[in-house]
Amino acid sequence: MAVYTDVSDEALRAFLQEYELGELLSYKGIAEGVENSNFYLHTSTGHYILTLYEKRVSEADLPFFIKLMGHLARAGLACPQPVRNRAGTALGRLCGRPAAIVTFLEGVSLSRPNAEHCRALGAALAGLHAAGRDFPMVRENNLSVGAWRPLFAQAEAQADTVAPGLAARTRADLDILEGAWPKDLPGGVIHADLFTDNVFFIGDAVSGLIDFYFACTDAFAYDLAISLNAWCFDADGTFHRDKAGAMLAGYDAVRTLEPAEIAAIPVLARGAAMRFMLTRLVDWLNVPPGALVQPKDPLEYDRRLAFHRTAADARDYGWEG
């Protein structure tokens, strides 16, 4: 989450006239994240989140995201619910952007999760995959392995200004990942962006999952690999095997991982690190003028990639099954 588009009080009040949400009491921008513009809303009927869709989110994909959240909630997953306006639609326009309001979830995100939090996250992710199995819509993952080389082309000429040797390391990793990327793994709806700020906890229990705007159809184990990267490393690249092992065990306790998925964990984790290094690198080099957001450091994921290059099999990620 982030803020790229400023929303005036007058514009927001006019937008809210399309809804039955009562009187606007307050609102403020949410600084975290890098993709859309997000605001906390407090009205006389409660608390909500307003999102203006920007950057990589295609307007044509918005019905997929909106309908997916409704489907997952009906299946018992704790996630935001889109709020429909007086016309019965969940999508509108605000400040020239597609916009939606969703319900607010209670809980807090964790900046330093422990192993038990990671175990709970693994179980929640498996629950998401199970809840989405019969979702009828399909959305291609447009940030999977086939997109990484074109993404790198946008930053390759300047990559070594961010870190010496980054361009050569990235080219070598892309050659390996493109040749080794697994196919035909079990799959369906995945979150594809389940960072710590997209998971809420009350105590040690997961209270909700948010920000489904990268959700797509892909391998379940790739979604798990994204979370391994996001939850089990420090910013300096230190890997916490206990956290990763707990996450894998928590997932496997809800949805049994197949042997092919377990064997693919090292390459999937390496690929997930590459995906986020590249999108962060492009963002780092192309911050929109006036954006109220701090781009995230691509070198955090370059340091994760250094670990993944040394991993031989799933045991290096704490797998003990």
Image (cartoon, rainbow, N blue to C red):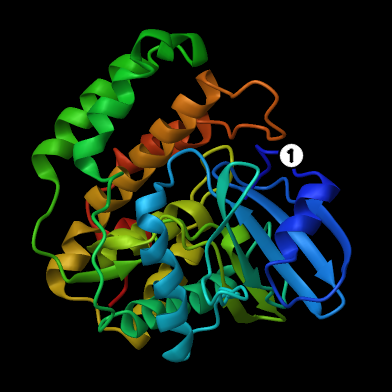
Identify which residue is drawn at 14% across, 72% down. 259
As drawn, is 54 to the left or to the right of 154? right
The image shows residue 72, relative to residue 23, as above or below, that is below
Identify which residue is drawn at 11% across, 43% down. 180
Taking the image as drawn, is residue 126 in sight?
A: yes
The image shows residue 305, relative to residue 129, as above or below, that is above
As drawn, is 89 to the left or to the right of 109? left
Residue labelled with disc 1: 6
Q: Position of residue 32 (x, y in %)?
A: 67, 48
Q: Nearer the viewer, residue 235 or 11?
A: 11
Q: Which amino acid does the dot numbered 1 rest on? A: Asp
Q: Position of residue 42 (x, y in %)?
A: 83, 68
Q: Nearer the viewer, residue 37 or 182?
A: 37
Q: Position of residue 28 (x, y in %)?
A: 82, 53
Q: Nearer the viewer, residue 99 or 20?
A: 20
Disc 1 secondary structure class: loop
